[in-house]
Image: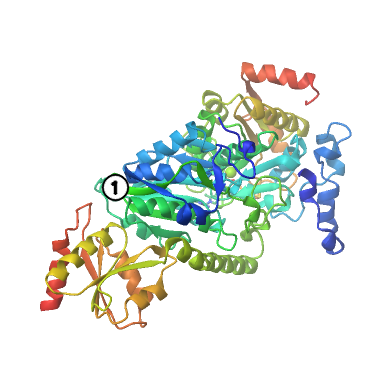
């Protein structure tokens, strides 16, 4: 069915705000693709309505646009999200998304992916999980790792802002040691969880730690992760999208913070399994990358 | 392995001829077998064109879950795996159902409580899957015995709850359950309860239709919420969680949606009546002034007590509730006409069924509702215990 299902009902078109029309006409859909779609089109395109309720300047919004621009086939992609600041963005995109509970995202995604493979054996439907660090690494860790163990063919993207942002700034497993946040009033007592390494040892064929400072880099990683998940197995991306509110930065300071952390806690890390490596080479030959 | 795309207009992917649920339950010729509740559930699932099941071991439902796995290995069920724990499993089956699959899972006692947050989410997303609950006590102290306290925790989850008395009923009910849950105007999850061990592990004579037929597949495109399969426009419900909008929209939408789920459960009444031959079954002396209101194994024990009471010259009747949600209020009131005292025997210490009956019938009939007798922790409930309770009332 693809793109048609995201089109505005002609009966309602004349009362639709321009930005909703833009969401249909200007998003980078794969079927409109004359050349490889993606990050280069972002300045002219629209995937996310500006009325989302994230704080002004929150890097999550920009990062979501990078992710959306990199989906190989957005119209055949299901995004499973979780409670938290990240979930505030999903009502404002056009794609199929699911919010069910806090922390169960990889379990829900496993069920969806398996059934889509069962119901549509001849179609490629991508399932992508996108959730915060609290959802992915604390309350949902079991379901995250177990989906890796089971080799579910899904891509998990953690928007790691190193804090429970949506509930007002509590320390999470991904917070740096020593950081003072609510519920760690004397500073966090243990190290930041190296989730990208746990992903590797738990069976991910691709695991990356990076910041969202460089759009092209983010898009490349997302594209590779989704392609590998289709054919080889689970993939994981740990993406720094700082919570500027909780660390006391202003709206224009997110990028600088990410650039600083490119040399700090989010120094680029990449694990690619040999099978995934071979598959990426094949994708390159076929022009998928 | 079978492929779902192998299904034709007349046959499902495993080559079974597709029939209506009416034909399966009421018309297909049947032959006699001797099996346990776990085994009969396999036979039911085999005839239900089931897309997906996710399992997790816990006594006494493990065997039923193994047998569904066998069906998957034999090509009858499309997707099957063991999840990481019951919370994960109930989220995994939610994903299966949202993606358009006819889905079943099973659990017991501690598993039910572990999974709790999911059940309200299931009904909230109008996912019509079936949970077969083989009731077992809940901790602490640790128990594996049949005690049905866990059902109490599900009463207001927004799911339909049916209660089967024996192996035969489990077979027929679990087939009807899919059909009723999937009706577009109902479309909420359903729990089919049996008492663990008493039904799951007891071998009884059952009548089964042949296994070369199966009911029509689930049609996810007749759902009130579009399936998450990128084949239909996305549902606004999942795209626009109300909390993201104004508080006013949030209050209004949440409240009306909660009412709608309960209304959907009520809308199942005519379908349930049809497929279950009524929401209550009455046996014994029609004009008795003494009655037992019970579900599951407790109604079996009540029937035995009723027969013993007849020998003592005391008339009584047993009103077996087959659905707990929807609560069969009208039918129960009718069955209680002329009844002075109604006992509610239960396999749990809190008496949730007695409390529910009292709350539902308050001010609507003159029958005195007497909670008890009750046994807990998996004790059996001999007819003598029930009779003793009755005699106290009669004599005192
Ligand atoms: C079972 C449950 N426990 C707690 C919460 C409260 N809660 C909602 S969002 C949230 C924090 C989310 O943190 P994270 O996943 O890091 O996302 P962020 O808001 O930082 O983007 C919490 C604790 C909940 N919704 N459900
Ligand atoms: S609280 Fe933090 S993470 Fe949430 S929207 Fe604001 S800046 Fe972004
Ligand atoms: Mg966070």
Decide if ligand 1 comes within 8 Å of the CB at mark 1.
no
The residue carrying pointer 1 sits among few (fewer than 14), some (14 to 19) or many (20 or more) residues within 10 Å by Cα, namely: some
Q: Is residue B9 above or below residue A226?
A: below
Quadrant containing the C terminus of chain A is: top right
Position of residue B188 in the picture relative to residue B289 (left or right): right
Depth check: give the residue in front, A175 or A40. Answer: A40
Q: Is residue A91 visible?
A: yes
Q: Residue at x 23, y 51 (%)?
A: B378
Kindly identify which residue carries mark 1: B204
Q: Residue at x 41, y 70 (%)?
A: B328
Residue B55 is situated, as x and y percent measured from the top left of the image, at 44, 39
Please tell me how many numbered marks the rendered image carries: 1
Q: Is residue B362 above or below residue B28?
A: below
Q: Secondary structure at mark 1?
A: strand
Q: Is residue B123 above or below residue B336?
A: above
Q: Residue at x 80, y 48 (%)?
A: A4
Residue B258 is situated, as x and y percent measured from the top left of the image, at 54, 66
| Residue that protrudes farthest toward the right in the picture | A34
Depth check: give the residue in front, B358 or A154. Answer: B358
Position of residue B222 in the picture relative to residue A220 (left or right): left
Colouring method of the image: rainbow
Q: Which chain letter goes with mark 1? A: B
Residue A80 is situated, as x and y percent measured from the top left of the image, at 62, 44
Q: Is residue B65 above or below residue B271?
A: above
Q: Residue at x 46, y 54 (%)?
A: B25
User: Which of the 4 image quarters holds residue A207?
Assistant: top right
Residue A16 is situated, as x and y percent measured from the top left of the image, at 83, 61
């Amino acid at each position: 069915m693809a793109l048609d299902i995201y089109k505005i009902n002609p009966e309602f078109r004349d009362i639709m705000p321009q930005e909703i029309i833009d969401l249909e006409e200007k998003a980078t859909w794969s079927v409109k693709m004359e050349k490889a779609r993606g990050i280069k089109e972002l300045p002219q395109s629209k995937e996310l309505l500006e009325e989302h309720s994230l704080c002004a300047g929150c890097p999550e919004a920009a990062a979501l646009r990078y992710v959306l621009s990199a989906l190989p086939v957005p119209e055949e992609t299901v995004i499973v999200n979780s409670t938290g600041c990240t979930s505030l963005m999903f009502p404002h995109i056009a794609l199929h998304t699911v919010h069910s509970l806090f922390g169960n995202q990889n379990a829900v995604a496993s069920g969806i992916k398996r059934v889509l493979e069962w119901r549509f054996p001849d179609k490629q439907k991508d399932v992508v999980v996108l959730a915060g660090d609290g959802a992915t690494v604390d309350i949902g860790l079991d379901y995250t790792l177990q989906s890796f163990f089971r080799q579910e063919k899904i891509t998990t993207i953690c928007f790691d802002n190193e804090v429970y942002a949506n509930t007002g700034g509590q320390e999470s497993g991904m917070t740096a040691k020593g950081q003072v946040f609510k519920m760690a009033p004397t500073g966090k007592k243990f190290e930041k969880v190296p989730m990208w390494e746990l992903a590797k040892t738990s069976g991910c064929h691709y695991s990356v730690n990076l910041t969202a400072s460089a759009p092209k880099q983010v898009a490349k990683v997302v594209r590779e992760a989704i392609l590998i998940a289709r054919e080889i197995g689970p993939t994981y991306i740990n993406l720094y999208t700082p919570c500027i509110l909780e660390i006391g930065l202003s709206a224009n300071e997110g990028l600088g913070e990410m650039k600083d952390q490119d040399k700090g806690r989010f120094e680029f890390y990449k694990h690619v399994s040999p099978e995934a490596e071979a598959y990426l080479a094949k994708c390159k030959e076929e022009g998928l990358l | 392995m079978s492929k779902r795309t192998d299904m034709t207009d007349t046959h499902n992917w495993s080559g079974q001829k597709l029939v209506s649920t009416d034909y399966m339950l009421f018309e297909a010729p049947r032959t006699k077998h001797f099996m346990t509740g776990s085994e009969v559930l396999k036979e039911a699932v085999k005839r239900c064109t089931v897309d997906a099941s996710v399992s997790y071991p816990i006594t006494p439902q493990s065997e039923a879950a193994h047998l569904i796995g066998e069906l998957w290995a034999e090509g009858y069920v499309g997707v099957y795996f063991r999840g990481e724990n019951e919370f994960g499993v109930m989220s995994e089956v939610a994903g299966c159902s949202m993606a358009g699959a006819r889905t079943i899972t099973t659990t017991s006692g501690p598993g039910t409580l572990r999974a709790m947050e999911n059940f309200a989410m299931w009904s909230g997303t109008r996912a019509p899957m079936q949970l077969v609950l083989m009731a077992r006590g809940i901790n602490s102290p640790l128990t594996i015995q049949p005690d049905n306290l866990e059902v109490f925790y599900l009463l207001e989850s927004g799911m339909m709850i049916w209660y089967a008395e024996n192996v035969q009923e489990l077979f027929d009910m679990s087939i009807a359950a899919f059909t009723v849950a999937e009706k577009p105007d109902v479309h909420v999850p359903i729990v089919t309860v049996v008492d663990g061990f008493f039904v799951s592990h007891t071998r009884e004579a059952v009548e089964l239709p042949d296994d070369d037929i199966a009911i029509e597949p689930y049609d996810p495109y007749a759902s009130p919420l579009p399936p998450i399969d990128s084949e239909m426009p996305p549902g606004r419900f999942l795209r626009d969680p109300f909390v993201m909008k104004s508080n006013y929209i949030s209050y209004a939408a949440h409240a009306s949606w909660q009412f709608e789920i309960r209304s959907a459960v009520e809308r199942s009444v005519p379908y349930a009546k049809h497929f279950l031959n009524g929401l209550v079954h009455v046996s014994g002396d029609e004009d008795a002034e003494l009655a037992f209101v019970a579900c599951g194994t407790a109604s079996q024990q009540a029937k035995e007590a009723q027969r013993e009471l007849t020998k003592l010259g005391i008339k009584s009747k047993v009103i077996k509730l087959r659905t707990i949600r929807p609560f069969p209020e009208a039918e129960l009131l009718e069955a209680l006409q002329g009844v002075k005292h109604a006992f509610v025997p239960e396999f749990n210490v809190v008496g949730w069924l007695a409390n529910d009956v009292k709350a539902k019938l308050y001010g609507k009939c003159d029958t005195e509702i007497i909670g008890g007798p009750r046994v807990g922790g998996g004790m059996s409930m001999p007819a003598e215990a029930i009779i003793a309770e009755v005699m106290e009332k009669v004599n005192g």
